[in-house]
Image (spheres, rainbow, N blue to C red):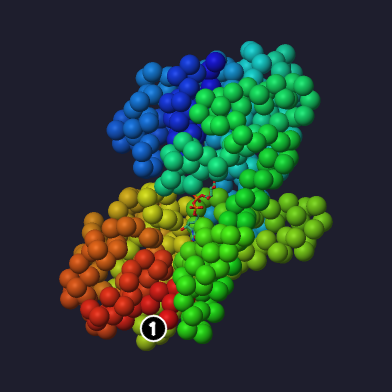
Amino acid sequence: MKICCIGAGYVGGPTMAKIAQKCPDIDVTVVDVSEDRVAAWKTEELPVYEPGLLEVVKEARGRNLFFSTEVEKEMEASDIIFIAVGTPTKTYGVGAGQSADMKFVEMCARQIAKVATSDKIIVEKSTVPVRTAESVKRILNAAGSKCRFQVLSNPEFLAEGTAMEDLECPDRVLIGGDMDKAGQAATQKLVDVYAHWVPRENIITTNLWSSELSKLTANAFLAQRISSINTISALCEATGADVDEVAYAIGRDSRIGPKFLKSSVGFGGSCFQKDILNLVYLSNHYGLPEVAAYWESVVKMNDYQKHRFSRRIVSSLFNTVTDKKIAIYGFAFKKDTNDTRESAAIYICRDLLDEGAHLAIFDPKVTPAQIYHDLGLDADTDRISICPDPYEAADQAHAIAVLTEWDCLKEDQMDYQRVFDSMEKPAFFFDGRNLVDLEALRKIGFESSGIGKP
Ligand code: UDX
Ligand code: UDX
């Protein structure tokens, strides 16, 4: 059997590496239009940073895992084609309610229909609006090909930073397919691939639409928990309660559970906001404005949390940050990834830049080029500087804002006395991730505050 995956990104790369590692009997080729990306997958410097990924890639690469830019050739040769191309919403500044941009998925479907000379199973891996499979089917079947195509939905639930563990031991694998005989046969083929290492009872099969909708719903529920605890963080700050204590207390109720209750500067990442906006769009489309408004509030609350944090910095710094240096600790949307898509840091940095601050940004994994790009600045700008270590960033700064929960920023890995000594006084510390011990910092002399903390 031959598998090809279109899109060598955060989803396609790690997923295919794991399939290749676990299924030595299957040839897996990841194709991408980007020559640079494909070239990087063949080196030790993979284009995606994910703990444990390089080891898995090295085990299978050249054996049954290949990377290529010959998209059409690999499509033609494969029995199963995964589509893992981007499905982005519009970037910063465009309001809620935008549905995902499906042009890449559509392009892939047209290309497959054009080049196919044998029957194929097409697997939607990219997060897509519900009923996308129907459009894909129509495009495939309209091309007049003699080949038969089955479309499956196999949404990705891996989280960046833990992608390799999530792939190794998934809570569940979800596969949606047509309920007729041919659809079920295709579903079974994909079940057999995952059954190489995933216990059968953890592989759920459903109809196509349930599978597509489950992906959006899972992310919406996860994001909703974060927005919910973030509303409580604002109340904690007003009342003197501690949001981590509240989260712990409610999480001990087994019906609620402890996960995804960490209050923060706001959720980011390529999926949560996009998927909720998809759900909002869909609800409006089907004439369900109350449902749409309910889910939209999760995104609105997240925006509120981000801006609330930047407003707090400005008001604490005597209502002005103009020409003040502020150290930004962390730019990625969470730790252990170099991904900055929808990172809360982008929005907070923009707010502070609008107020005239000078930002000194440190992140252990994000490249300077990415930061300039995300903030819409040229590399020769004097509005931000990008620092190779956190000490340089804090030197003569008025404040530090922790925006990503990198382990290297914790007090046991940092000399915060040295940081304090080098800063302007009063030295402010805003912990947007509740990462450090605020009391310990206060003892050093910092004016420190967290999210939802007394
Ligand atoms: C993307 C989406 O963001 C996510 O929502 C979806 O679930 C899966 O696809 P990701 O892998 O993180 O996730 O995206 P990205 O890292 O941007 O990778 C997509 C890759 O597809 C890029 O390398 C791009 O060059 C490639 N691509 C895109 C193609 O090869 N062909 C195309 O037509 C379009
Ligand atoms: C998410 C889903 O978890 C995954 O199943 C799906 O396939 C893709 O989207 P990802 O975006 O990689 O994964 O990261 P996730 O760990 O879910 O975190 C998303 C954001 O929420 C991050 O910005 C993170 O910092 C934030 N977060 C998470 C919190 O603020 N508090 C929490 O308790 C958990």
Direction bottom: furthest residue? 318
Res 111 visible = no
Name above or below for residue 219 compared with residue 194.
Answer: below
Pointer 1: what residue? 316
Residue visible at 73% across and 60% down? 292
Mark 1 closeness class: few <14, some 14–19, many ≥20 residues within 10 Å: some
Front residue of 224 and 327: 224
Q: Dividing the picture into quarters, in which one does residue 453 lie?
A: bottom left
Residue visible at 48% across and 41% down? 166
* Image location (x, y in percent) of residue 411: 27, 66
Tell whether 244 sits left or right of 323.
Answer: right
Quadrant including the N terminus? top right
Name above or below for residue 199 compared with residue 452.
Answer: above
Front residue of 241 and 327: 241
* Image location (x, y in percent) of residue 234: 52, 77
Q: Dividing the picture into quarters, in which one does residue 350 lie?
A: bottom left
Residue visible at 67% across and 45% down? 214
* Image location (x, y in percent) of residue 84: 55, 35
Front residue of 394 and 237: 237
Q: Dividing the picture into quarters, in which one does residue 118 lie?
A: top right
Q: Secondary structure at mark 1?
A: helix
Residue visible at 63% across and 17% down? 116
Looking at numbered disc 1 in the image, what kind of residue is underneath it? Ser
Tell whether 227 sits left or right of 336.
Answer: right
Quadrant including the C terminus? bottom left
Res 91 visible = yes
* Image location (x, y in percent) of residue 23: 48, 22
Tell whether 344 sits left or right of 52.
Answer: right
Tell whether 309 sits left or right of 40.
Answer: right
Decide if ligand 2 comes within 8 Å of the CB at mark 1: no
